[in-house]
Amino acid sequence: MERETIFCSAVIVAAGSGKRMGADRPKQFLELCGKTIIERTAAVFSGCKLIDEIIIVSSAEGIRECENLLGNIKKNIKYVVGGKERYDSVYNGIRAVDPSCGVIVIHDGVRPFVTEKMIEDSIEYAMRYGACVCAVKSKDTVKICKADGFVDHTPDRELVYNVQTPQTFRRDIIERAYRTAFERGVFGTDDASLAENCGIPVRIIEGSYDNIKITTPDDLVVGEKILNGGGGNKNS
C-alpha cells in the first residue's frame, strides 16, 4: 500500500465524565499549564501531516465546548456525540470517518503527550500489519493470579507491555472487529482487544512513558512536570 493512496482518519475520544478526577467538569476540559487537555491532544494530530481528518467524539453537552476550543484547527474536523460506554463512543467515531478512509487512528483525548512520531509510526505499522498499538515495557514484575487470589504464574517481564493509545488499524479490520463485538456482546478494555477476539494479530510499537492518560489529580501534577522540562511533547 502506498501512503499516497491511504486516507487517514483520527478518532479522538473525549466523551468521558471524569469521575475519578473529582473535578466540576470533564477532565478533557481541564487546563494543563494554560491550555485544556483536549486542545493539547488535538494540536498534535492537527500538526501531523499523515492525518487527513480528525473526528472528535464528545458528550452531547461537550460538543459545543470542543467546537469553541478547537475552532482554530486547520484540518478537516468533525464532531460526533459519544455513547454510554467507551466502545459505543469509538464506534460512533468510526462510523463518521470519510468514505475514502483506509486507516483509522484511535486515541484517548486525555493523552496529550502523544507525539507526531508515534502517530506516523502507528500508521505505517497499521498499513503493513493491519493492526498495531503503542505500548511501553512494564517496569514492574507482573503476577497472573487465579480466582482465589493466589499467584498462578509470573510472565517474563521482557514480554509484558503497558498498552497506550494511539491504536491504529486498517479500516476494514477495525470495522469488522467492532461489528463482531456488538454481535457477540463481547468487548474488551481497549480497541485492540476487539481485534484480538476476531483472531487478528496486533503488532506492538514503541510508545513513551510520558504518554500518560490523565485520569486523576495526581496525573495532572505529573503532566505539569512533563511540560515544565520532564520530557514529552510540550505543544507550546
Image (cartoon, rainbow, N blue to C red):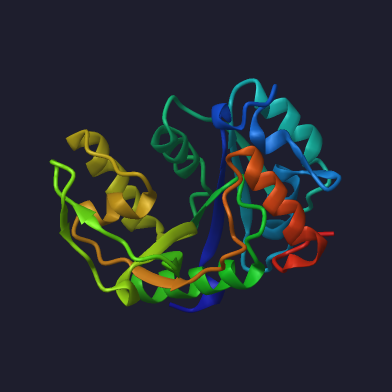
Could you say which quadrant of the image residue 56 lies in?
A: top right
Q: Is residue 135 left or right of residue 19?
A: left
Q: Which image quadrant: the C terminus?
A: bottom right
Q: Residue at x 67, y 28 (%)?
A: 63
Q: Residue at x 26, y 59 (%)?
A: 143
Residue 33 place in picture, x, y as percent? 83, 48
Q: Is residue 228 left or right of residue 203?
A: right
Q: Is residue 75 visible?
A: no
Could you say which quadrant of the image residue 159 lies in?
A: bottom left
- The answer to which of 169 and 101 lies nearer the viewer is 169
Q: Is residue 123 left or right of residue 236?
A: left
Q: Is residue 70 visible?
A: yes
Could you say which quadrant of the image residue 158 lies in?
A: bottom left
- The answer to which of 12 and 19 lies nearer the viewer is 19
Is 140 above or below relative to 27? Answer: below
Residue 3 place in picture, x, y as percent? 53, 76
Q: Is residue 172 left or right of residue 58?
A: left
Q: Residue at x 43, y 24 (%)?
A: 84
Is 170 above or below relative to 128? Answer: above
Is 51 above or below relative to 214? Answer: below
Residue 207 place in picture, x, y as percent? 52, 68
Q: Which image quadrant: the N terminus?
A: bottom left
